[in-house]
Amino acid sequence: MVEWSARRLFPGDDLTSAAHRAHDWAAGPLGPVESWPVELRAAIRTVMPSSVPMLLWWGPRLVQIFNHAYTPVLGAKYPGAIGQPGGECWPEVWEELGPRADQVFAEGVSTYSENQLLFLHRHGHLEETYWTFSYSPVHAEDGTVAGVFVATTDVTPRVLGERRLETLRQLGTLSIAEADTAADACRAAVKLLSASAADLPRVEAYLRGGDGEPVLVAAAGEGPDVPADVVRRVAAGGESEMIGGGTLVLPLAAGVRGTHGALVVGLSPFRSFDQSYASFVDLVTAGVATAVDDTVAYGAERARATALAELDAAKTRFFQNISHEFRTPLTLLLAPLGTLLEHHADALPAGQREAVSAAHRAALRLRRLVDTLLDVARAGADHLRPRLEPTDIAALTADCAAMFRATAESLGLDLEVDVEGGTVWLDQEMWARIVLNLLSNALKFTTEGSVRVTVRTTGDSCVLTVADTGVGIPDAEQQRVFERFHQVDGVTGRSREGVGIGLSLVSDLAAALGGGVTVRSALGEGSTFTVTVPLATSEEAARHTTLDDLGATFLGEARQWAPAAVVEPPAAGAGERHILLVEDNADMRDYLVRLLTAQRWRVAAVGDAETALKHARTSRPDLVLSDVMLPGRDGVALLGDLRADPVLVRVPVVLLTARAGTESAVEGLRNGADDYVVKPFHPTELIARIRVHLELSSFREALLAEGEREASTLREALASRSTTSQAVGILMAVQRCDADTAFKKITELSQRRNVKAREIAAEIVARFLDDLD
């Protein structure tokens, strides 16, 4: 039986592991290490080697064991925290932490806290800190909870940075349009900064009067009196001065004109005045000074504000006008294409019918993009105005979800709909856009499992939840998913297509309805989006709005996400070329297959890089035609794999991309592509480029094969015991001639020099071998 010891449980060579080994465990609640249960030993062996700050609480007294990554969290509490009960180690925050630990022991479930404020006493004073941490139960053999895993992350810098950045952002957007004097600007700035008492518990603004003496014009918060001579020195253009370690007096610079006065700020007693804090205070001071400067130049600022307002209005008009201009040709496209498909589809050959259907879906997608961009422009100009009408919210949501049921089934996903609610006042189109965007997004990033739509009305509000079992969103990205044009890097969905405005529009529409949207996600486990909007019930009968046209614009895109079955080429004919096509968009893939097979080329079509690489290694293609933007690993990564494979290294690769510009082309060519074609492309040009690369590849392979044959002839000659045969083989390889010509040259040399042919041959062989050495 294995004998357990502190050295075996805490084997690390870091100081924390050494301190755990040296601790007298036998004198504490856990008793000798040798008697610890197997569950505790297993938990310790999980915690100690981790590079993530982790803490283990064991037993009813929550005895602490932690790894080296956690030690900085403790500050001066280390090393006394080793083996110490949690409540004794963290008395200043146990009121917040204790109930969470009790919940884990009582219910056996994990808890998760994000950006939790804790005032810790680690360095001789209370310190404002923020943490994201989870408590997970450690079960004993009998199923009871024996301990708690604590994984924690110090998010203080991020929270403080975001909070201070928000203060600076608001200060930067401070409107002084109604400020007639510099004092008015100071009062507006101080009032705004009073909301940031956690960082600036005291703010006072002094402006220099006509006699140069500073006069207090605005104040917020309290603090000790500031000596008048200090304010006078600083306001006159002196350096910043610290008073008592908690109050800072800074000059309000006036550009090249000296100073406007001075700003007095109080510093938080719960944060050290480090470089970050000092930079924040400097930026605040600069912001106040700028506000004063702007007020002094009030006339110019008003003209600038007017110009900006006109520019914003012009931008909105531009989007509205361009939307109208797009809608006209789109209508002329959609109407005849829809009529052709609806009434004359059977009269079309199969290939033409599919081409018309693809064109119709592409036009629908373009219309959705135009409508979305217009909504984004309206939201940016605050022109989204809901048109409220009596709405059966449960029926409306169910209708939206029903549009995706067939698509979900084709993707192998379960679509669960659980909606409740009565008739309420709501903008039906806005709500439908929210539901359709969230459902479309869920299907796009869920490759297996389910998507669940839930609606609940409680009191005067409605809560919509769209939950999936998809790829999830990294923690660092969850705060940015609602930003316009932001796309999460490194997350694999069914397609790389999109411009990053769907979730932004959801947020804008929810805000226009008076509510908001949040996300909760775990990488690899799925995401849950929750929309909450205020509602008022209606006694009128619900009105029904037809949403088929709106839904079609989403479904046309969603149907492209069905897993791409590998389209195997027919059996090879004499001289036929084999092309491997890699494209995730189904319509584009079908179009390219038709285009390439019309040239009598054999085409194998796949939808992602992994399948493409597997197929290429099974059946070596003559050329690879790949889109750059692919789900998972992109076309450039596939290119790297092909160039690293000794069998596929010489296969020509042509990349397709929607990104125009010479930089994109240079990037593709630098990574080893033979050519780079930008969408939209002319089919004749694409075919011509592919044909050129096929011919170049054939010519290159022929030259290599000829070189190999010559090398083989040389090897055979050298292997021969006949010196004359060796010489003939060498001349054939070096002078690229046939055997008769090589032998004739040896004979001519023999006659010219009056030396036997065998000696001439020996001389040729010897010289060749010397050159090799």
Image (cartoon, rainbow, N blue to C red):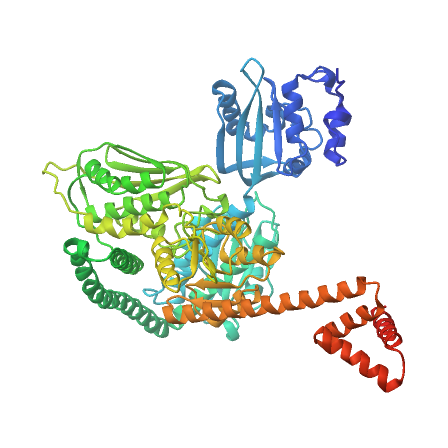
- In the figure, 634 relative to 690: above or below? above
> Which residue of the protein is positioned furthest toward the left in this rendering?
540
Horizontally, residue 542 falls left or right of residue 304, namely left
> Which residue of the protein is positioned furthest toward the bottom in this rendering?
752
The residue sitting at 67% across, 36% down in the picture is 71
Q: Nearer the viewer, residue 322 or 643?
A: 643
Residue 236 appears in the rendering: no
Horizontally, residue 390 falls left or right of residue 263, namely left
Horizontally, residue 648 falls left or right of residue 551, namely right
Task: Residue 84 in the image: state x and y as whole percent.
Answer: 66, 24
Q: Which of 510 and 420 is in front in this view?
A: 420
Q: Quarter of the image containing the C terminus?
A: bottom right
> Which residue of the protein is positioned furthest toward the top in this rendering?
142
Q: Quarter of the image containing the N terminus?
A: top right
The residue sitting at 28% across, 51% down in the picture is 556
Horizontally, residue 477 falls left or right of residue 443, namely right
Q: Which of 651 and 388 is in front in this view?
A: 651
Residue 366 appears in the rendering: yes
Task: Residue 285 in the image: state x and y as whole percent.
Answer: 50, 61
